[in-house]
Amino acid sequence: MYLIIGLGNPEEDYSKTRHNMGFNSVNKLAEEYKIEINKKKFKGLYGIGEIEGEKVTILKPQTYMNLSGESIREIIDFYKIDTKDIVVVYDDIDIEPGIIKIRKKGGPGTHNGMKSVIQHLNTQEFARIRVGIGTPENKQDLINYVLGAIPKEEAEKLDKGTTLAKEALIELIKNGVDKAMNKFN
């Protein structure tokens, strides 16, 4: 069973921010495969379904971003999921809007959600899809940038990125992380 995790913030106020690209990506995946993400447990919302013949659990932690690892740890322990079957989708300021990058492993960079995930999993050995959101002109304004309103002219590029992330998730589930990396990186 694959565990697909989208990182984001749970409150409606944050739903249309750059920091919710992980939630937006897994929502698109769930919609395409008619998986309802409506079960409440593990400090998150999750749904179970099938994608391309594989059983999949989609999780949206309902902790705040910097505590995402707590939710993931609980669901992994409950279902006994191996980290090789985990994919985390999240926003990345070091990638331009509309672009995604897939990696098999790696550090968290400046992303507090990923710092929490790595800390709670006690490993960096899991796949991730980074959805580009671009860098703010003023790096001191990072919090307002990732949690602020998205200008209309940028929204289309970000939507393209979450659609690519959804397609990359499907490819990864069907053919593995290496083929997904070759196709989308």
Image (cartoon, helix red, strand yellow):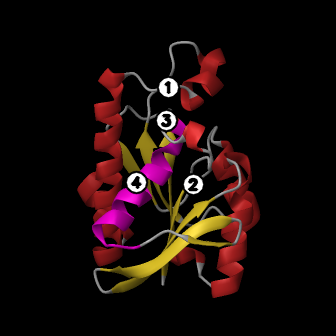
The residue under label 4 is which amino acid type?
Ser
- CB-based contact (under 8 Å), mark 2 and mark 1: no
Name the kind of residue labelled 2 in the image: Gly
What residue would you read off at disc 2?
A: 106
- Residue 120, position in %: x, y? 75, 64
Foreground label between 4 and 1: 1
For marks 3 and 4 on the same chain, the one whose residue lies earlier in the sequence: 3
The reply to whether discs 3 and 4 touch (Cβ–Cβ < 8 Å) is no
Query: Which of marks 1 and 2 precedes in the sequence?
Result: 2
Q: Which residue is mark 4?
A: 25
- The three-letter code of the residue at mark 1 reads Ala
How far is the residue under mark 2 from the one under mark 1? 29 Å
Task: Answer whether residue 24 is magenta in the image.
Answer: yes
x and y, in percent, of residue 57 in the image: 49, 76
Residue drawn at 32 percent across, 41 percent down: 159
The tag earlier along the polypeptide, 2 or 3, is 3
- Inter-mark Cα distance, 2 to 3: 22 Å
Disc 3 designates what residue? Answer: 18
Q: Amino acid at mark 3?
A: Arg
Q: Is residue 114 left or right of residue 116?
A: left
* Dots 2, 3 in contact, CB < 8 A: no
Q: Give the alpha-carbon distance from disc 4 to disc 2, as whole Å.
A: 20 Å
Residue at (63% x, 86% y) in the render: 79
Foreground pick, 170 / 46: 46
Any part of residue 122 in sight = no
Task: Classify 10 Å Cα crowding around label 1: few (below 14), some (14-19), many (20 and above).
Answer: some
In this view, the mark in front (3 or 1)? 1
Mark 3 residue crowding within 10 angstroms, few (<14) / some (14–19) / many (20+):
many
Please give the name of the residue rendered at 68% of the width and 43% of the height, measured from the top-left corner.
112
* Disc number lying in front (2 or 3): 3
Q: Are marks 4 and 2 in contact (CB under 8 Å)?
A: no
What whole-number distance in Å separates the C-alpha atoms at marks 3 and 1?
A: 8 Å
